Amino acid sequence: MKKNYPQRTFFIASRPSLLLTILGLLTACAGNTTSSNVVAPGEEKTPTTRTLNAGAALLQSRPPIDALNAYLDGFHFYNGHPEVQMEAHHYCSILNEEVIQCVIYDGNRKDAKLMGVEYIISEQLFAKLPDAEKALWHSHVHEVKSGQLVAPGIPDIAEHALMEKLIHTYGKTWHTWHTDLNKDLPLGVPQLMMGFTADGQIEQRLVTDRDRRLGVDSTQKKKARADIPAPAIDPGADAWRSGKVIQIEDPTGRPHQH
């Protein structure tokens, strides 16, 4: 099914000369190098189930899935628990020039578990939100400038243009399956996640391991992105920095951050 490529203008409005390059290569494969953190309990697929899957793949259309045409890899932590960190593989659909929606997995192989979702909006839309809503969102400035956020598999020039746009956005992220904590089922309630805002916050081993698996160099990307101006961050975002922590109370009493 044909993808809606014109939606990708969200990322390239300021660099129209890169249009053809990005449109042709944004879906490039970065290699299936990261397996899931857990094995879900249950019996193996039966021949009947495999046949049904194959038939569905051939006969059913999946427009929302086909629209997932951008792959981003970065890192999150539990709001209120910056020491509990994990890698997050984002598969994103660009709805328009100011809104992106992403599904988040714990790997980039077929066995990856759906961990959650992230909604990404422009700084213009974010500025219009009420203060109570802003507290749920995190900025992307440090993720971009540090080289932590990457778009594996596309040329550096295309990724650079992409990051020039993402640095002006904010994300709201909920994780629903906490495989980073070795939970083999999606237990408990969703947890609000945040992004890093300064050097020294992330465990460097996470970045080093990710870079090795995906064949990227975060240090080099940080240097290459030095020319991207860092916009002022809305004071309503990243509320955890001022001690405002928001999480859903879990009626099961099951701890999520330990």
Image (cartoon, grey):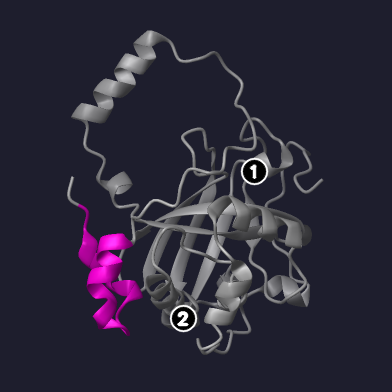
Amino acid type indicated by mark 2 = Glu
221 sits to left or right of 97: right
User: Which part of the image, by quadrant, shows the N terminus?
Assistant: top left
Please name the residue shown 48% across and 54% down the image. 90
Say if residue 43 shows up in the picture: yes
What is the magenta range?
3-25
Q: Give the CA separation, mark 1 to mark 2.
A: 29 Å
Q: Which residue is mark 1?
A: 189
In percent of width and height, residue 22 lies at 30, 68
Closer to the camera in the image, 251 or 96:
96
| Element type where label 2 sits in the image | helix
At mark 1, the secondary structure is loop
- Residue in the image at 54% along x and 13% along y: 43
Q: Nearer the viewer, residue 168 or 248?
A: 168
Would you name the residue on which mark 2 appears? Answer: 123
- Asked if the stretch drawn in magenta spans residue 24, the answer is yes
Q: Is residue 93 left or right of residue 106?
A: left
Count the numbered circles shown: 2
Q: Which mark is residue 124?
A: none
- Residue 102 lies in quadrant: bottom left
| Chain-order first, disc 1 or disc 2 | 2
